[in-house]
Image (cartoon, helix red, strand yellow):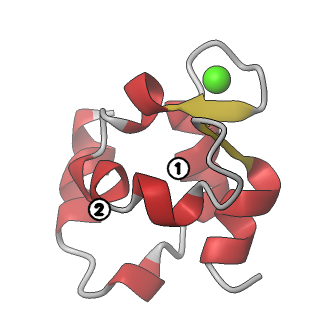
Amino acid sequence: MKKFACVLFFLPAMGAFATGADLFTSLDKDGNGALSKEEASVDSRLAAVFEQIDTDSDGQITRAEFDKFQGN
Ligand SMILES: [Ca+2]
């Protein structure tokens, strides 16, 4: 996790959530398929854009919202 955070830190741009699938899974600590604000807060970059990703504003980032944010 520590190593992963370092890798993410050096990603140059927002659109570079290239390892998104792994990021989503690693952040979803309770494995419910959605990232709560608390779970997302582990990653400062993700936390900074939480509201943008959470398009339906339910306080959870679903896989669909996450993928959409990445342009998938
Ligand atoms: Ca979760």
Residue drawn at 66 percent across, 38 percent down: 58
Question: Could you say where residue 42 lies in the image, as x and y percent from the top left?
Answer: 30, 33
Q: Residue at (23%, 35%) from the top-left corner?
A: 2
Mark 2 falls on what kind of element?
helix
Q: Amino acid at mark 2?
A: Leu
Dot 1 or dot 2: first in sequence order is 2
Location of mark 1 (residue): 23
**For the residues bearing labels 1 and 2, Cβ distance under 8 angstroms:** yes
Above/below status of 72 relative to 36: below
Does 35 sit above or below residue 50?
above
User: Based on the displayed image, in which of its 4 quarters is residue 37 positioned?
Assistant: top left
- Residue 5, above or below 32: below
Viewer-proximal residue, 52 or 7? 52
The amino acid type found where label 1 is placed reads Leu
Q: Which residue is mark 2?
A: 8
Residue located 23% across and 86% down the image: 12
**Foreground: 21 or 47?**
47
Residue 8 pos. (x, y %): 29, 62
Q: Residue furthest top?
A: 30
Asked where in the image residue 64 lies, by quadrant, the reply is bottom right
Does the closest atom of ligand 1 sit within 8 Å of the Cβ of label 1?
A: no
Classify mark 2: residues with Cα within 10 Å, few (<14), some (14-19) or many (20+): some
Query: Horizontally, is 70 left or right of 18 in the view?
Result: right
Q: Give the left or right position of residue 1, taking residue 28 as reference.
A: left
State how far apart marks 1 and 2 are (Cα): 9 Å
Q: Could you tell me residue 13's position as x and y percent?
A: 30, 87
